[in-house]
Amino acid sequence: MASRPLLLGHRGLRSRSFSVRENTLAAFDLALQHGCDGFEFDVRLTADSCPVICHGDRFAGITIARAACKRLSALPLLEDVLARYASRAFLDIELKVPGLEPYVLESISKFPPQRGYVVSSFLPGVLVDLRRRSRSVPLGIICETRMQLSAWPELPVDYVIVHERLITPALIFDLHVAGKKAFGWTINKKASMIRLSNSGVDGIVSDKTKLLVATLSPG
């Protein structure tokens, strides 16, 4: 990936141009069909400790953390996603809640991603617990505010996944000097994709997968 950053779909993809729901197998498939290297997706935990794929804490009027897995059969399971894509996509596995750590590590051991992966979260405590459980799993902190971003040097992470408005060439330089990889999200404008690619960012997460690939990996 020396010539360009990793191109990743945000929740698979999120575009009105395509009639697929985010965080579904259809969205993941379409991101790869467009030419992305992989995709980001969100994991939550049901009341009976089943890791399911969903961004919000509710689905179809059901609170995920209070429901049994069988009530959420429309949601993909983490193991199903790993089994389907481990051999052909870079996976950014975002943990939305604490408590997922042992289940995610177990699933990764069953279906180790062959094209690379990162387990990411906004929650520092989740990342600290994951590092305690595994020295080898690649971890990433997601940062939307300057306060969140300021904490990265103290965390056991390999990736820093930064909101577009906080990314600067100086930040990318500092992260690389520290041996970290820098991802930018959510990058939906062509000019921003080009700017970040030229700045040396290691990965770009976008809702607009077709535009992302056409801009940075044409042909």
Image (spheres, rainbow, N blue to C red):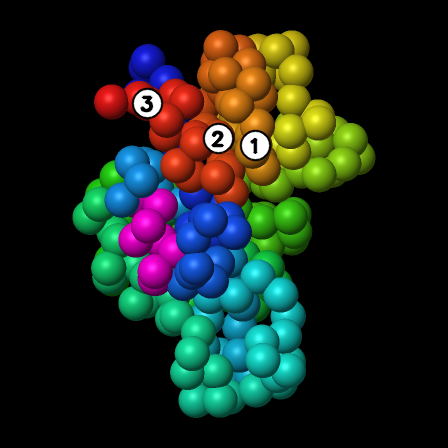
Q: Which residue is drawn at 26% across and 53% down?
A: 85
In this orientation, does residue 202 appear? yes
Q: Mark 1 points at which residue?
A: 187
Q: Residue 204 carries which label?
A: 2
Q: Does 3 sit above or below residue 34?
A: above
Residue at 64% in and 48% down? 122
**Residue farthest to the front, as pictured:** 17
On the rendered image, what quadrant is the N terminus found in?
A: top left
Mark 2 Cα within 10 Å, few/some/many (few <14, many 20+)? Answer: many
Q: In this view, which residue lies farthest toward the left?
A: 87
- Give the mark nearest the N terminus, 2 or 1: 1
Residue 29 inside the magenta-drawn segment: yes
* Amino acid, disc 1: Ile
Task: Tell me the CA gap for discs 3 and 1.
Answer: 15 Å
> Which residues lie in the magenta part?
25-32
Mark 2 to mark 1: distance in Å?
7 Å
Question: Please, what is the three-letter code of the amino acid marked with disc 3?
Answer: Ser
- Report whether 215 appears left or right of 100: left
